[in-house]
Image: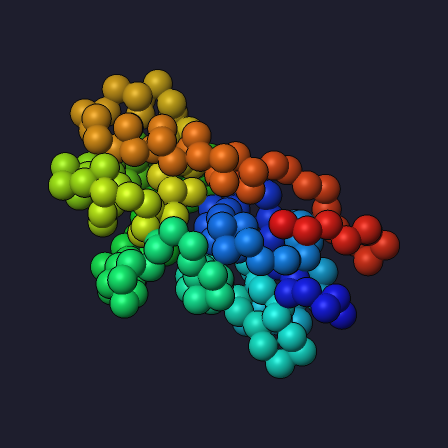
């Protein structure tokens, strides 16, 4: 195995994007293996209890297969701009956001994006459900330029990939929504060099692939 931690990831997965942002920000030397979510290699399946990505293999005995755990681990290694806050003050509120995003909002986003995969409700139903969360975020941003503080925190990072994907399903509709603070926040976050860098697409990894680093 590589001497560096290995991240099994997928280009378009928002959970993977979340993990990649944190690992890149922490300036950690990470081997990146881009894989297909529906065709995971044995090496990825061996460390994922959910048979999905992202998975971060640190050593033969240490690994994480939840994006939120990967984010926390990365920031514990190096947090140069204080994304966790003083004495980890942003962790508890971020945990609550994770609960919402990783369950209800994730489901609404999936059904909104994949409108041909279900017949029980029209896509507008899932968009309206997801919009409730967008409204909550806009209200949070009435207090600060970012979700928990005047500067970027871990909360912004774990939220960004999901809101970005939601906004891109129907960009014309999203641009007309009455959430100016959210629009400004999303524009600033998407334009970050860090986000642009982790969004670069990579080919599918195989055992014969040359190692690349995040």
Which residue is most to the right?
208
Q: Is residue 38 left or right of residue 119?
A: right
Residue 208, image x, y percentages? 85, 54
Image position of 197 with respect to 72: above or below: above
Is residue 66 shown to the viewer in this render?
Answer: no
Residue 137, image x, y percentages? 22, 42
Colouring of the image: rainbow
Name the foreground residue: 80 vs 180.
Answer: 80
Residue 57, image x, y percentages? 62, 68
Instruction: Name which residue lies at 54% across and 50% down.
Output: 24
Q: How many marks?
A: 0
Which residue is most to the bottom?
61
Name the foreground residue: 183 vs 44.
Answer: 183
Which residue is most to the front?
80
Q: Is residue 102 left or right of residue 53?
A: left
Instruction: Name which residue lies at 55% across and 54% down.
Output: 27
Residue 36, image x, y percentages? 66, 50
Image position of 44 with respect to 181: above or below: below
Instruction: Name which residue lies at 22% across and 49% down.
Output: 148
Q: Is residue 187 left or right of residue 125?
A: right
Is residue 79 shown to the viewer in this render?
Answer: yes
Name the foreground residue: 113 vs 92.
Answer: 92
Can you say which quadrant of the picture contains the N terminus? bottom right
Image position of 171 with respect to 144: above or below: above
Name the foreground residue: 117 vs 200.
Answer: 200
Q: Quadrant of residue 189?
A: top left
């Amino acid at each position: 195995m590589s001497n560096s931690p290995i991240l099994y990831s997928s280009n378009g997965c928002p959970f993977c994007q979340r993990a990649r942002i944190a690992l890149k920000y922490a300036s950690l030397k990470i081997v990146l293996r881009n894989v297909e979510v529906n065709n995971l290699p044995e090496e990825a399946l061996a460390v994922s209890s959910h048979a999905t990505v992202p998975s971060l293999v640190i050593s033969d005995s240490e690994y994480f297969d939840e994006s939120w755990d990967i984010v926390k681990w990365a920031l514990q290694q190096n947090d140069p701009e204080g994304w966790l806050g003083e004495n980890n003050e942003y962790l508890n509120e971020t945990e609550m956001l994770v609960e919402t995003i990783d369950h209800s909002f994730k489901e609404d986003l999936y059904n909104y994006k994949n409108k041909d995969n279900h017949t029980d409700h029209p896509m507008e139903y899932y968009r309206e459900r997801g919009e409730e969360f967008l409204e909550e975020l806009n209200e949070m941003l009435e207090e600060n330029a970012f979700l928990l503080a005047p500067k970027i925190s871990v909360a912004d990072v774990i939220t960004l990939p999901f809101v970005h994907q939601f906004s891109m399903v129907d960009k014309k509709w999203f641009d007309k929504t009455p959430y100016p603070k959210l629009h400004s926040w999303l524009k600033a976050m998407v334009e970050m060099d860090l986000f642009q860098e982790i969004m670069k697409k990579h080919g599918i990894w195989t055992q014969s692939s040359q190692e690349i680093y995040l």
